[in-house]
Image (cartoon, grey):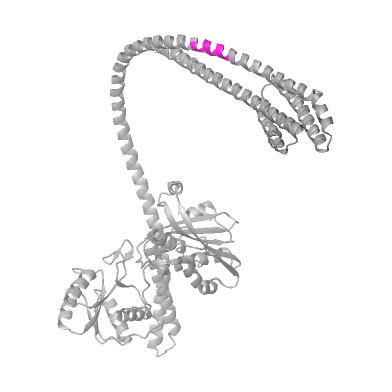
Amino acid sequence: MRLQSLPLVAGFAVLTLIVGTRALLVEGQRANRAAARETIEYQQQLSGLLSLAQEAEAGQRGYLLTGEKSYLEPYQKAVDAIPGQLAHIDAMTSSNDQLAPQISHIKDALAQKLAEMSETIALYDKGDASKALELVRGGQGKAAMDDIRASIDTIRRIGAADIAARDEHTDQAEAWLRVGSLAALVAIFLLGAYTIRQSRRRFREVATAQEELMRKNIELGNEIDTREKAESQIRQMQKMEAVGQLTGGIAHDFNNMLAVILSAMNLAQRKLKRGENDIEKFIEAATDAANRAANLTSRLLAFSRLQPLAPQVVDTNRLLTGMSDLLYRALGEGIRVETVLAAGLWKTYADPSQIENAILNLAVNARDAMDNDGQLTIETANSHLDDAYAATHAEVTPGQYVMIAVTDTGTGMSPEVIAKAFEPFFTTKPVNKGTGLGLSQVFGFVKQSGGHVKIYSEPGQGTTIRIYLPRFFGPEEPAAPAGRGKSAARVTGTILVVEDDARVRAATTEAMRELGYTVIHVGSGQEALQQLAATSDIAVLFTDIVMPAMNGRKLAEEAVARQPGLKVIFTTGFTRNAVVHNGVLDHDVHFLAKPFTIEQLEAKLRDVLDAK
């Protein structure tokens, strides 16, 4: 096989040699032309130098003969231009040892001529015209000029000889080019004929090889299928392991909270049976555990990107300024807080309460990492994540973002910890010092808002966590007037509660009656429509969303169609439903997430009833 390929290789080698030689000859021609241009330019520079010397001499003699100052103007211009001309000539002579002695001789002669002219003008200015003319007639200046001309003529002869030699070399190169071109044509013809012959033989070999390749591809496809099945099983095992870790974390935390609630309620029941009324601490413990369980659920929904968001146009600088008191109370006196707010910060479109929660979570984590003694820096900036950054972070969309950075002087994180930092229930804090859901909640909120979060940290060097929220480009929406500070406009009608879970329905109804409202409650959408038809003074429909047969959204649409102006409040414990799309509440939707406190219920009813 190698012997058969030898003529082809040899042909290509000859062809390459011929083409390469031709290229070298062409480059030689270019170099010759460039050298000829340089020689001509060099001689032009020398001619210019001689012209300047002659102009200076003419001005000097005109002044000495007439005494007119106007003759000194061309003299002075020529004298001022001579150093620059010499510098240019020196730069062009630096690489030519043959011309350097001639240039040195020209400089010496020129210096003598300039000195002679300067001296004669000075004598004339002092009134000694006869001595000045005598110095001119002495012939020293003329001899200097003759030396300059002789040196320039010598340089011209050297240049002309160099150009003639290069022209001769160029003629030889052109002759070689003609011979080389003819040889290249012959070689190409012979190589083409040989290639056609070889191609026919190789075609048969390729056909045989293709058949073998198809067979190998079939075998490879079978192997790939086998590997994909094995990898799928491994991924499923990893997924189950992650689900197990998540389930274990939820079970651990919920069981702890349920243990507190059950224990507190049992103790309260026992005391009430004995006629004792000092059960407030047990109720407080149960309430606290229930609130922590609700907070745990909220954080899990945030990590899963299922929490309902109410985004607004947010000025992050103003939001951070308003959080200063909250941060100082949460962090304590041992933490020094510094804010660096960028001027001209862009707006972002996100849920402001969730931004506050994210910053507070990061600040509390930073406080724990600094052991209640250190500096926390919160910084804002306009940022652009480009295509290069997005190429290394697959989840990032290139574009403009509002950046919020939280930096601490704490213990820092190792690369292994950073890799797991956003996983739910992962924590490096001691037992009972953290749930491991803070960073996962921040991660979920930022991703649900279309942003990006990045950790920069090294052990012993502190930590910086940067949140990037997309820049808002649309017109800023007017903020809705807050009604929290107003007294509630007491509803004159009835509230219709629709809830399929009897215990939740009873608790909600009692809470509303405790707040002084008139309440009717039903367990399904169909019953709600019947009550709406039978009762004329229903002002608010308070409905669960996830219900069998007819969900809350369909019920609300039917109810408002029958009774325009009816106000609707949705509630649910699971947010992937008919009023939340892509994690964002539908426009003009009033929503209250389960579980809620009486205070939260009161505030929501007040907002809805006060709204125009």
549 magenta-colored: no
Q: Of helix, strand and loop, which mostly describes the magenta segment?
A: helix
The foreground one among 188 and 497 is 188
Q: Percent from the top left, x then y, of residue 293? A: 40, 71
Q: Quadrant of the N terminus?
A: top left
526 sits to left or right of 66: left
283 sits to left or right of 37: left
Above or below, 582 relative to 103: below
Residue under the point 37% across and 57% down: 243
Above or below, 444 relative to 18: below
The foreground one among 556 and 151 is 151
Quarter-of-image position of residue 230: top left
The foreground one among 127 and 402 is 127
Instruction: Tell me if I can see residue 161 in this picture.
Output: yes
65 sits to left or right of 267: right
Count of numbered marks: 0
Q: Which residues are magenta?
A: 166-174
Instruction: Tell me if I can see residue 547 in this picture.
Output: no
173 magenta-colored: yes
185 sits to left or right of 575: right
Q: Percent from the top left, x then y, of residue 272? A: 39, 87
Above or below, 418 relative to 483: above
Q: Percent from the top left, x then y, of residue 171? A: 52, 11
Q: Furthest-front residue in view? A: 66
